[in-house]
Image (cartoon, rainbow, N blue to C red):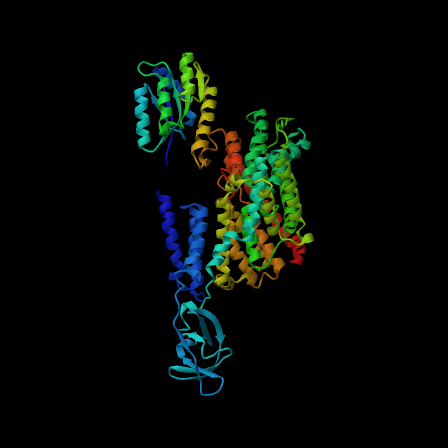
Amino acid sequence: MSAIYILCLEDEPEVLDNVVRDLGEFEDTFPIEAAGSVQEARKIVADLTVRGDRVGVILCDHIMPGEDGVSFLVELADREETVATRKILLTAQAGLESTIEAINKAHLHYYVAKPWKKAELVQIVKAQMTEYVLGQESDIRPFLGVLDSERLASAIRQKGLLTDE
Amino acid sequence: MNLKKTVGLVLAVLVFFIPLVVPIPGLQFAARLTMGIFMSAAVLWMLEPIPIYSTSMLVIFLEIMLISGQGLLFNRPMAGVSAVPGTVEGTWVVDAASISDGTVYTLEEGRLGKAVPVEVLEIGTERVTFKAEGLSEATLLASDATDWRVQYKPLPYKNFFNALSNPVVILFLAGFLLAGASVKFDLDKTLTRFFLRPFGTRPAMIVLGLLLATATLSAFMSNTATTAMMVTVIMPIISQLKGDDPLRKAVALAIPVGANIGGIATPIGTPPNAVVLAALQGSGISIPFGTWMVLALPFALFLLFAAWLLLIKLFPAQEANVTLVLKGKVNKSGKAVMLYVLFGVVAVLWMTEQQHGLSSNIVAMLAIVALTVTGVVNKEDIRAVPWDVLWLFSGGIALGEAVSQTGLAAWFVNSINFETVGYMGVVILIGLVGLAMANFLSHTVTATLLAPLAISLQYSGVVNGASAIAVLMVMVAIGSNMGMSLPISTPPNAIAMGTGTFETKDLAKVGVTIGLLGFVIAVVLAKTMWPMVLQSL
């Protein structure tokens, strides 16, 4: 069964740890991968693609030594295996130009300004992952207790994702 | 492919051969094949190595291949011999092998024609002289009267294909299209607002309102879609309540409970009903739409009331007042209004079947035509119909056909002595078995496995008359629908559980109690009210 990952990309190790810790409740259903640089993240994505797994949500910082977050997001948006990945920018400083690029070229799904509140971050990731699952998965039963149940219920009603049997 | 799937498939294949290998007296070959198909399908439906709708298609396919006149086994012509006129007038002489049990078998184009009883006059060493009606010199007789192919007149393969277009399938297709259109034009939400408004703000009343509203909707729409919609309605209520307020559980559990109970109220409420109806129609017994409702509504109302008392007792609210914010506008577009009108007309026509004389299956066709002609339902809506559910119970219909026509039903009825339990004993047994199975298996699969066995009981000594068998079959429907103790029992349970407001143990407590209560209410009704209602069948 193809696994759906959450990928966190952040160059400051402390911050990266915080993100991963805050998203701990998703770990059972959506394994979490952490990357300290775009290069590392690229390798993670390549490895899991080869295995047939996918990235459902990526939380990405922008200003990093080496390649920056937005360019990586644009790269992901251009590739077939990651075009559906929900892209979240998690950053303290992204200038207007980079943000515009992220929205237009990378099809950014959400912008979270640092510092974040854990409850908010969890809600945002839950909502984004719900959209990913609704767009990509035909059987949404494993996600009923984990993701946004109201949104899932609404989609079940609209699209007949589940039926009497 | 994982281990569980492999085990399921291997087991299904092995189980198929059991009735073929084990000697079973009194069961002819085609009936053994049917038993093999039945047992194999049961394994596949229970363990689900392949999707359940796929198993249904497999059932139809195997029946066509193995027991139809055009399938591999029965489509090869048999060798025939002619009977020669005997020395005395009106007598015939034929090879001894052509007679078995005082019967010869005519062949038409190499296939089994008729079984002709003969009066044996003289038995020679190789030839036998006999008298019989309707034979001529041109008649060909089967040269071996004990050949397994003369024991069974194969059904045309079309009979099995027809399971896919059985009138009950059309009935449910109409139901699905109406339900789909209701979602498209938000009729389900409009009706919910309308039903819930009078219930006020007291928690106990709100729980009652939710039970009744959900049940009413799920009588016409799928239990699952109704549950999904009601979950979005209760989320604002849940978020008002404190985390440990038991009312959260009462409110969340009211939805799947109401949905499951409501599905029984009309013939189209839920797929197991289709299997039961088709089985009855196959025996020439037709329960009109309105009559089904007369049987089922008292049951549903009693049980809903009991469920209400159970929920408010088990989960008493801390909060004294709950505001129900029901937002939304009534869709007034042309097509929406047309839907409201058509829905009303079709519902009335269905319920007045005995007055106007058109069967509900015909009204269903009218509904389909009206919906598509007016554009209320378009191509996308047709494609969005859950065809897998239609296939699922088509398989059940085909299975029932084979079980009765190959003589498996008759054999089953004769092998077990039902006199010892009596009629009510059989009703109780079937209800309990159905209830138990439905908690772990798909409700439709439960009905599919029980209906062919239950309908065959009309040939036993204990079930006498159309009314008696109809009551038994309604019991099958109820048992199949009342399994609701676990998240896996039925999709509404899983969806409600997804809200995270209650635990499996809460669901189990409520589900087991209501399941058993429902069973008891059904047994009481089966003894008292239902036979009276069904007298006219």
Q: Number of numbered discs present?
A: 0
Query: Is residue B261 visible in this depiction of the protein?
Result: no
Task: Identify the residue at horizontal 36%, vertical 18% (top origin).
Answer: A69
**Which residue is more in the foreground, A114 or B509?**
A114
Q: Judge from the rendering whether residue B485 lies leftward or rightward of residue B527; answer left or right.
A: left
Residue A31 point in image, percent of width and height: 38, 28
Task: Identify the residue at horizontal 48%, vertical 32% (top origin).
Answer: A145
Which image quarter is the N terminus of chain B in? top left
Quadrant in which residue B212 is drawn: top right
Which image quarter is the C terminus of chain B in? bottom right
Residue A67 point in image, percent of width and height: 32, 16
The residue most toward the bottom is B88
Query: Is residue B206 visible in this depiction of the protein?
Result: yes
Q: Is residue B9 above or below residue B408?
A: above
Task: Identify the residue at horizontal 39%, vertical 58% (top origin).
Answer: B18
Residue A142 point in image, percent of width and height: 44, 35
Residue B409 point in image, percent of width and height: 50, 61
